[in-house]
Image (cartoon, rainbow, N blue to C red):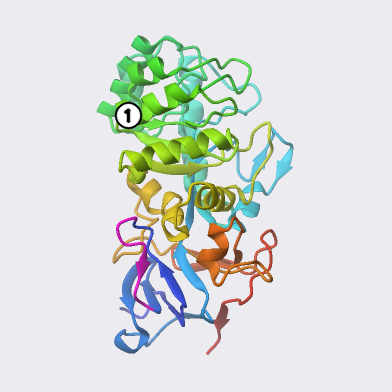
Amino acid sequence: MDRHSQKLVVRNIGLMLSGMLEHPILDADCIVAVDGKIAAIGFEKDLDTDGATTTVDAHGVTLAPGLIDSHVHPVIGDYTPRQQQLHWIDSTLHGGVTTMISAGEVHLPGRPKDVVGLKAMAIASQRWYENFRPSGVKVHAGAPILEEGMVEQDFKDLADAGVKLLGEVGLGTVKDGKTARQMVGWARKYGIQSTIHTGGPSIPGSGLIDADMVLETGADVIGHINGGHSALPDDQIICLCENCSKGLEIVHNGNERAAVLTLNTARELKQLNRVILGTDGPAGSGVQPLGILRMVSMLSAFGNVPAEQAFCFATGNTARERGLDCGILAHGRSADFVLMDQAQHAPGKNILESVQLGNLPGIGMTIIDGVICSHRSRNTPPAQRLPQEVTA
């Protein structure tokens, strides 16, 4: 480490969640990051903690990868015209979310639908969130909506300009599976990942996307399989789980019963690794700063999933499906962490039991790329214990 490097040491960790379903709890009490990447995980006595530029005493709380929201609709900066709300991303950071994935910037007033305009908007969206992180949060944006008239060269142009995502298939003028499949194929050819709207209409201009169209289109992620807001019939949800290998995205702004059905079906198929979480906000239901935490606790409680595995739905599962370098505690990955503890007076013997009983944890700190971005959450219930930055 040279003299200009930044070194973070988080010690006295009571419980470390890895984000990996196959091994959700790590036997460790300390983590070290250098220049925003994880450099070492283990016991403090065995690690090189000298020369830290930032030291955090966790005071026995839980450390997990920063949560990932797989489905948001950002517009510009930290403002959403859909709800006339400022600082919604900052508020979501206080819910433990350190990374967001755009499913399309559809709420921009006057959103262009001509090919030239939609490409320009997607490139601009990708740029402004690349250049500006609201409160430090990583927002992967620039997700154009498919419109009639797009040709293969348009997808190459988008990819060459840095666009890596498609907005929800079905929110634009492309409504048939054959055309959508061709465009999704072009996008995939140039390294652009796709998500498809699933269920009933959510905004004017969108329409029903049933299981047949989802299967025909072959998008990379089945967006809000539990509906955004209206879910498909049970048999179609089960059909999608059984007949494709894509990510099964469950969202806060959907049908909770359908969410549990999806979870149970994925478990029966021994494919819990496909379950990822989003909020689908901002939307008509508003902004959900604690939406990902609520999905973790709801699926753990009603889906009878150990809390340490439910947290993987919001971290490592999403990171793998989305090709991100965060979401998993491993050497060389981004040092994005959330530190949390059992909420004061919440039932349960510890944080994991409390979450599986349906309770939210209290968040005490978030860290992105090895930098502290927030302290005690203003939105979660107060935690029993709080981490503390230690000054030299």
- Residue 22's place in the image compared with 375, above or below, is above
> Quick check: is 355 in the magenta stretch?
no
Give the structural element (helix, strand or loop) at label 1: helix
Q: 10 Å neighbourhood of mark 1: few (<14), some, or many (≥20)?
A: some
Please identify the dominant SS of the magenta region. Answer: loop
Q: Position of residue 184 (x, y in %)?
A: 34, 22
Question: 51 or 2, which is in the foreground?
Answer: 51
| x and y percentages locating residue 115 in the rendered image | 46, 16
For this rendering, which residue is in front, 232 or 371? 232
Question: Is residue 73 shown to the viewer in this render?
Answer: no
Depth check: give the residue in front, 328 or 74: 328
At a point 42% along the width and 40% down the height, the residue shown is 264
Would you name the residue on which mark 1 appears?
A: 242
In the drawing, does residue 168 fall left or right of residue 193? right
**In the picture, which quadrant includes the N terminus?**
bottom left
Q: Position of residue 354 (x, y in %)?
A: 57, 64
The segment highlighted magenta reads 21-28
Q: Is residue 142 left or right of residue 294?
A: left
Q: Nearer the viewer, residue 352 or 99?
A: 352
**Residue 42 figure quarter:** bottom left
Q: Amino acid at mark 1?
A: Glu
Give the residue at x 35% y 33%: 193
Q: In this rendering, is residue 355 above or below 211?
A: below
Residue at point 41%, 54% (across, down): 312
The answer, for residue 382, to whether it is visible in the render is yes
In this view, the residue farthest toward the left is: 189
| Picture layout, residue 302 above or below residue 218 | below
Image location of residue 370, percent across then percent down = 44, 68
Q: Residue furthest right?
A: 84
